[in-house]
């Protein structure tokens, strides 16, 4: 039984690898097309600064940014809601916030102006 499931796992892994590499190739093609059209637009508009910056950035090549985050247990999280929740927890711990309810219930203190507002006569004299 164990040997029969092993080829299935290998086939699944190969299928996932193939789909991921295809997805990355497509993303790279989209990125390069968009970057080339942006460079052409900057060239036509004679926007030299953005054109040079785009060429320098284009020479560095395509670097995909994965949407993968590890949670506290070290498991990979790819769901956008889970990623947001993990960031929220991390920032709450980092900023030592007591909780969302506590933040909403705090009173907002307003400042009292010490300098009185100028009268119209003073403003007219200042213009003269």
Image: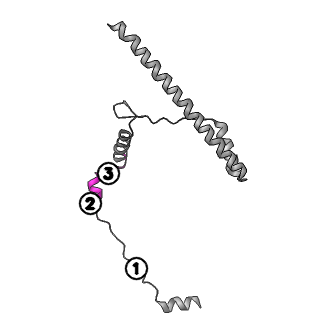
Magenta residues?
A: 94-108
Please name the residue that numbered disc 2 is placed on: 105
Quarter of the figure with residue 106: bottom left
Please name the residue that numbered disc 1 is placed on: 114
Q: Tell whether 21 sits left or right of 90.
A: right
Q: Nearer the viewer, residue 68 or 109?
A: 68
Residue 9 on image: x %, y %: 40, 15
Location of the N terminus (image quadrant): top left
Local SS, label 2: helix
Location of the C terminus (image quadrant): bottom right
Please name the residue that numbered disc 3 is placed on: 97
Between the C-alphas of marks 3 and 1, the distance is 32 Å
Q: Residues within 10 Å of mark 1 (few under 14, many from 20)?
A: few
Q: Nearer the viewer, residue 100 or 98?
A: 100
Q: Which residue occupies 48% across, 90% down?
A: 120
Q: Which residue occupies 49% across, 27% down?
A: 20
The mark lying in front, picked from 3 and 1, is 3
Which label was assigned to residue 53? none
The mark lying in front, picked from 3 and 2, is 2
Which is more N-terminal, label 2 or label 3? 3
């Amino acid at each position: 039984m164990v040997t029969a499931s092993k080829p299935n796992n290998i086939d699944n892994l190969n299928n996932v690898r193939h789909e991921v590499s295809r997805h990355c190739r497509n993303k790279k093609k989209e990125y390069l097309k968009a970057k080339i059209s942006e460079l052409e637009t900057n060239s036509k508009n004679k926007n030299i600064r953005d054109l040079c910056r785009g060429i320098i950035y284009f020479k560095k090549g395509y670097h995909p940014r994965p949407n993968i985050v590890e949670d506290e247990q070290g498991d990979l999280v790819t769901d956008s809601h889970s990623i947001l929740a993990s960031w929220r927890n991390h920032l709450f711990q980092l900023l030592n916030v007591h909780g969302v309810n506590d933040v909403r219930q705090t009173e907002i203190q307003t400042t009292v102006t010490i300098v009185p507002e100028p009268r119209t006569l003073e403003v007219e004299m200042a213009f003269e």
